[in-house]
Amino acid sequence: MKAMFDRFLFGGDWNPEQWDESTWERDIVMLEHAHINEATINVFSWTQLQPESGRYDFATLDRIIALLQAHHFGIVLATSTAAVPAWMSREFPEVMRAGADGVRRVFGGRHNFCPNSSVFRKFSHALAGELSRRYAGMPGLLVWHIGNEYGGGGGMCYCDRCAEAFREWLRDKYGSVAALNEAWCANFWSHTVTDWRDVVPPSEYADGIGTEKAVISGLLMDYRRFQNDSQLACFINEREAIREFDATTPVTTNLMGAFKDLDYFQWGREMDVVSWDNYPGMDTEPSYTAMCHDLMRGVGGGKPFMLMEQTPNQQNWFPYCKVKRPGEVRALSWQAVAHGADTVQFFQLKQSLGGCERFHGAVIGHDGSEETRVFRQSAALGEELKDLGRDVMGAQTRSAVAVIFDWESYWSLESCVGPTTGFSYPQEVHRFYRALHKLNIPVDIIASTTPLEEMRRYAVVVAPALIMIKPGVARTLEAFVDEGGHLVTGYMSGLHDEHDLVIPGGYPGPLRELCGVWVEEIDGLAPEESIPVVFNGDGTTTQGTIVASIMHLEGAEAVADYGGEDFYAGTPAVSANAYGDGRAYYVGTPLDERGMDMLIKSVIRHAGVESIETPDGVELCRRYGDDGRVFTFTINLTGAVRGDMQAYEVRVTSDSA
Amino acid sequence: MKAMFDRFLFGGDWNPEQWDESTWERDIVMLEHAHINEATINVFSWTQLQPESGRYDFATLDRIIALLQAHHFGIVLATSTAAVPAWMSREFPEVMRAGADGVRRVFGGRHNFCPNSSVFRKFSHALAGELSRRYAGMPGLLVWHIGNEYGGGGGMCYCDRCAEAFREWLRDKYGSVAALNEAWCANFWSHTVTDWRDVVPPSEYADGIGTEKAVISGLLMDYRRFQNDSQLACFINEREAIREFDATTPVTTNLMGAFKDLDYFQWGREMDVVSWDNYPGMDTEPSYTAMCHDLMRGVGGGKPFMLMEQTPNQQNWFPYCKVKRPGEVRALSWQAVAHGADTVQFFQLKQSLGGCERFHGAVIGHDGSEETRVFRQSAALGEELKDLGRDVMGAQTRSAVAVIFDWESYWSLESCVGPTTGFSYPQEVHRFYRALHKLNIPVDIIASTTPLEEMRRYAVVVAPALIMIKPGVARTLEAFVDEGGHLVTGYMSGLHDEHDLVIPGGYPGPLRELCGVWVEEIDGLAPEESIPVVFNGDGTTTQGTIVASIMHLEGAEAVADYGGEDFYAGTPAVSANAYGDGRAYYVGTPLDERGMDMLIKSVIRHAGVESIETPDGVELCRRYGDDGRVFTFTINLTGAVRGDMQAYEVRVTSDSA
Amino acid sequence: MKAMFDRFLFGGDWNPEQWDESTWERDIVMLEHAHINEATINVFSWTQLQPESGRYDFATLDRIIALLQAHHFGIVLATSTAAVPAWMSREFPEVMRAGADGVRRVFGGRHNFCPNSSVFRKFSHALAGELSRRYAGMPGLLVWHIGNEYGGGGGMCYCDRCAEAFREWLRDKYGSVAALNEAWCANFWSHTVTDWRDVVPPSEYADGIGTEKAVISGLLMDYRRFQNDSQLACFINEREAIREFDATTPVTTNLMGAFKDLDYFQWGREMDVVSWDNYPGMDTEPSYTAMCHDLMRGVGGGKPFMLMEQTPNQQNWFPYCKVKRPGEVRALSWQAVAHGADTVQFFQLKQSLGGCERFHGAVIGHDGSEETRVFRQSAALGEELKDLGRDVMGAQTRSAVAVIFDWESYWSLESCVGPTTGFSYPQEVHRFYRALHKLNIPVDIIASTTPLEEMRRYAVVVAPALIMIKPGVARTLEAFVDEGGHLVTGYMSGLHDEHDLVIPGGYPGPLRELCGVWVEEIDGLAPEESIPVVFNGDGTTTQGTIVASIMHLEGAEAVADYGGEDFYAGTPAVSANAYGDGRAYYVGTPLDERGMDMLIKSVIRHAGVESIETPDGVELCRRYGDDGRVFTFTINLTGAVRGDMQAYEVRVTSDSA
């Protein structure tokens, strides 16, 4: 596809308003030395732009923009609405968020607004509109950036206004309390609703079991949907204000990978381009980062995305923050590009002197020197991206394998009271993804509701822990397999309908016939436990963890059986079912890495999907240009020599297809 | 004694109101296939029965009952008052409980009422009365079941109304603030009360140190007593409403074993039959379960009890929930019967589709199939209980050994600030109980205030960690030993009077002369530490943990000495004192399993109590019928072969005495 | 200097108001048997002294004092204001403290007042004044003791009144919101203040990240300063009331060693004599206790101090409380004297029967016996101190080495968001102190703002983790080294100015030239990680932990380099810089014990400071009398034989210099 920008954006967040104006020009000159060509500005300046309720002051922003324009920087212009001004919280206390204890916050922090506050909606709409009126069409303006990391401030809002809006939302959805009671199975523990006013948000003082579970999980699921909608409405509210004066400049907000609270597939549909912030911690596996890139690309419908933030060196907000090793930032940057990023942007271009992020890495450190390792490596990366990155822009990925990521299954799985508290949904998705990644098999990450016409593009679809089966999904998966597709699913899948009620008739519910198995029981394993899983054929023994599905074959054949001494030893642990022209696999237990590798290898061999061998820790990805060029990225994502590659070595080659 | 029911009840909780009425009959037919003959109904249906303040609607319940009657099921009819309707919490917010932070809950959860709410008292009295008026004398009605698991919703209420009622309660108890100040040693940290209004509940914002401790522990003890009384008053309030229309049907509520917050000995006196819910976790030792059965039987004055709930398969609310192994539920059921249960009831007969217990085991699972392992095992158990269980009903246990379980010592020990936080009171009771259990010695669990005429029935009385000595107790124990009884007590016993004040004059206070020892100091051990305890005679070395009493013999002889290198090595760790015609043992430190086994073996040999050897993990119990028949239950409570018994094997034999 | 008292005070807290008056005389007689000659009284008696708002009642206190006078006891008379009466909290709720959740406490606990409550200030001033009017000049009165362990009740107050007073405090400090915004770098996350009313305390509902960190750390630093000032104003408020009637009797309050919330150097300036409460736990290293003694002596300007509290046996409020081993209390007492204590006082003389400290050790235990180990050891210690302690009184310590302890660096280091959460400031000070202690090198602990004329008394100054450099400090340190002094500093030092803003220009900021190093990056290590540090010369390899400064020599020479495999292996880990006539050391990483020992040995050898070898765990200290006598204290602080010393053995010798 066509590249979105006329150059490969290399830049990031710049907050000159924290500094004396005399320092600005020197910053820009230094950044130019590092080949930086873009600045993301105005992310947190609301009070400066609007020092009181009835007055705007754009003078400082004007001067910042003028300087950037003079230096021909691209500009990602944020709307500054992710942290409300202190005066607003003082004059309109209702603008502030309330936590799960129901207590409304006073001033402080960020992402501190109630998403249903009409005051917030009014003021943020007005500010976004003013910015658009003033800056639409100006030279250098590349992207509008609304708010910042929506939802990142610590959970949902539980204030009275949200409660009121939630009741409206439910009334629209269900029409009657009778329908609501049925959807929620509300007769459980006499939770029957006889009046809309009976509904209260599932806080810790109400129906919540902590904040991640609730007695009536349908209530929690709906509250999550409602809060997601509310936050998204805030985004749309500002986008519409911008569009009053600027019909064309792309609009985005920065997402956060596998962040739990927002269903990003819904967000992706409202954004012109997806952008996201990539912050792997020191224990994050490179394959997990890869998965997040693919997820973000999938959220954007497969188009290239912006890497809006990453750190040029260590983070500061992990408990323990390592500096990035030489070459590590380069490798992470190219990994992003390999998975579809068309920008490389940093938080932050210059380290602040105050505030809780002052020890977060930056291109320009506290020393203000170009002699630092970080500055020099940033500059080298900029040099490299200027040409090579430019070539890649717009090129697309091609995947024969899709992995389903379903935010409602995320919420449902982690809110499930029994049989285990051991699940993290993204980690279960990653358990399957990692095996594909090790084989250098390109993956698209798709929604569970992806229609058949899109799903049939893939040879293999993987649906890990797809606990919630929304209407039509089972039928699509059946048709996909029937036509010859290969489906891999398993433990915890198929249990719930869209109301988070169990689908009766034997697990995995609507996937039972497709998978040819009946899961009679789901055994929970203690954290230190595992259960042997013996693969048929060569008898390799691997281990299952967390849960073990005790299942009966109903047409499927066993791929592996449980070993060990337990009463269900010798029964199937993994199965494959011929269904129409395809096959459906059911994985009864979270396999360890070795077991998952064995399984996935077998699946892709059957499905005829090509894999590529590389040394352990070396990733190989491709992007395909409209002009037929194929870019191959080979990246050693480890800090050690791998095969003929040095630690963190990156190789990018381009061929004509 | 005479059996309470005309058949052995095999059944449990059934909640048809969560389902479409068309499914009910099929459920009943399936349950009949499993030999189920009883249903516990109406446990959580308040809103359905009373959809608004001024209106009742018994139509659904009528139909449920009619169906059960048509199938000749026994009915345990609950009063539905353990979860208040949403409309009630909305219209009368004072009905809701407040937590230790003083914040009143809004709607959600269960056990969510303030026990001193006059609104709750009025509405629950009215509903229980209506139910009794309507259903008293109906065919099939076997038991009234009031509320559900009182106190299970997470702690005491700290609302203003409770505070007010507490002040009244104190005024009644103490008469004057001067008496109150003296009882509480209130001059400590100037906590002197000069007006009743000065007293506030020991919340975290007041005198509480967390919720389990307080600066003035007498305040906390009294608040616990008051809250226990308040909850019990709720039970009595409903019982009296039932008795207006039904003078004879037994009334119960389901207790929870060694649950901390309620003094079940007081509850037992108000209940016609004790019933309880047995939910061992995957780390619960079988001897702990046995102890809880004996405790519940003791609470009921030694009469047979109802096993109101247990799971037919895995629980769902533990962090990690194993399925029950083949035979395990059968073994647990027979263990209950062996210890005095005259019913075997499940939570639940049918798995719900929604609500936070939907993954809790049930006779009828989500699959609705009779082909499941759980259904088949349930049916086999039902078959077996039909005859064999019927025979056993009414038969009683006979024990030569009693163990004291004192709820106020429970509260006092765990609220004690120093010398250790390492104590769990029930675990300390179990430490002694387990040694008796391994020897298959029948045990009665009794209150500390048991009068001498009852206590003298026993050859041995064990009083673990009896930190609070209520008036008269020391004298009773002295008389018991003087007459030839054997008393085993020890660490932490005898420290406090009924106001939780230390009894001066040297530990163990009023037990000092009886035990013939003076405990000068109580050393605290770190969690990873232990101290050698060397038994005289054969020199066997065992270990003490948590605390070590440093003591002087004052007439007693040493049974074991501390070993090791510490300064009190060589001083007595366990002692025995001849007192009158009996002996009093003082165990200075929580002995490990081996040490406790040695001690208890020696005690029972001296006391002439008979023990029975069985393989490790195999329990042998007896019940004695009025007709002279003796039932012997031999149960392998482990998942492994033991001697000639298979895993979880159960043998029941009956002989004439 | 002249001894403050005419005898060596041996005594402690006595609370006869908790007991029947008939017991008092017997207590005193017993205490006399133990050579006790002092009682600290009236610490928690406010309600007794003032049973209602408008009435005092000193009758009980009069009788207590009369008895003590009759027995010629010295009296430390407290003002009873550390726990407000219940009636006061009921009639004036504003008197109570609010926690970090903003909720005002109700009655309970202690240290429960808001330090900005005008009600508290008025009542406490009045009571202190009444006490002084009544008892000033009476026989036996030795010291006034105001309040008790200020700040010990669990954190700062966050009530509305404090918020209001804080705004006033800020207005006085900064003059304008513009100056405030600059000092706080408030444009970060748009925290700009446009009105003083915008400022709210950094609670968890505001800008706090927990209670120890905040988004705007300058706000948190100022709130800590303000709260410290507020508490100190409470102390001064009472002191002034006392001084209206008593111009001469020394006034103190009991401090708590390295307690975080109060800047004791400020307190020391307001107290006539420093007193403190020494409560080592079972894992406290003896060198840490020694450091606290030196800190308390330093807070008092180097003068002898009072050991106001220690336990004669086990504490009760640790999770696990060991009894003190034979000789241990004696050794701890003499360690205090060796470091400058001129009193040995206990909490408590008699064990209470109620209240949460009833299991805290006491000279007279619950047994009321003189036959206890504790009583006998106390008596022996009293006998010993009577003469030997008397001789030592007034003698001073002499140190060639000073260690800087800076409360604002304490707050700043532990509030720093990145690069690690691994730091405890006192532990980092102790890391350096311990190495000096092992060499028996006397140490003074001084403030970072100590003027050059005082600092130049020392050959070596150690400044561990001095993250905040207040105005003038860097210049003083430069001058100190320039004149020939030896400075040891390192990791995390020099980062922040007095507003907690990073000092730009390369770490360690204003110490960069002095140390001759530039720290380019600070790597964070995981808790289980360490990095090899190889000393030049003999190549000894030690380990660094928590962080590793990656640094460039700018004139300094490397003392040790990083080893291992990381990319900065081979770069300097520890450096020394010749500067003027002295040397400045920079320690790049928290060295393990062995590494720190090597470094400190090298430093003191270069500096010509004398060290004394003793067996491991044996401490040797000296005090110097005005008359030329030198007291040498040799104390085995371990429970094992060390060289020719028994466990906990103490030797005190006196020589003429």
Image (tube, coloured by chain):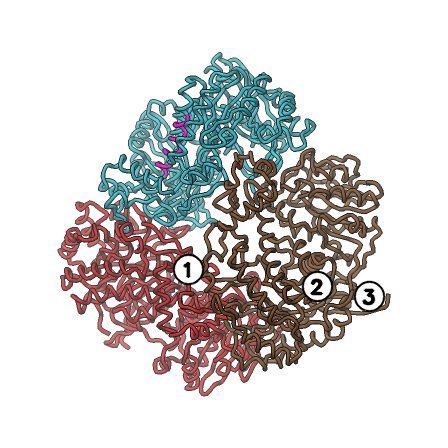
Chain colours: A brown, B cyan, C red
Q: Which residue is mark 2?
A: A305
Q: CA distance from mark 3 to mark 2?
A: 17 Å
Q: Is residue C170 above or below residue B165?
A: below
Q: From this viewpoint, which residue is outermost toward the front? A: A244
Q: Do dots 3 and 2 share one subunit?
A: yes
- What segment carries the magenta color? B224-238
> How packed is label 1: few (under 14 Cα within 10 Å), some, or many (20 or more)?
few
Q: Chain of mark 3?
A: A
Is-magenta flag for residue C364? no
Mark 3 and mark 2 residues within 8 Å of each other at the beta carbon? no
Q: Position of residue B579 (x, y in %)?
A: 31, 30
Is-magenta flag for residue B232? yes
Q: CA distance from mark 1 to mark 2?
A: 55 Å
Secondary structure beneath disc 3?
loop
Q: Chain of mark 1?
A: C
Image check: B221 left or right of B655?
Answer: left
Q: Position of residue C527 (x, y in %)?
A: 55, 61
Label 1 is placed on what type of residue? Thr
Secondary structure beneath disc 2?
strand
Label 2 is placed on what type of residue? Phe
Instruction: Look at the image and tell me whether residue A458 can be seen.
Output: yes
Q: Chain of mark 2?
A: A
Q: Quadrant of the N terminus of chain A?
A: bottom right
Q: CA distance from mark 1 to mark 3?
A: 69 Å
Q: Position of residue A370 (x, y in %)?
A: 61, 80
Quarter of the image for residue A554 reads top right
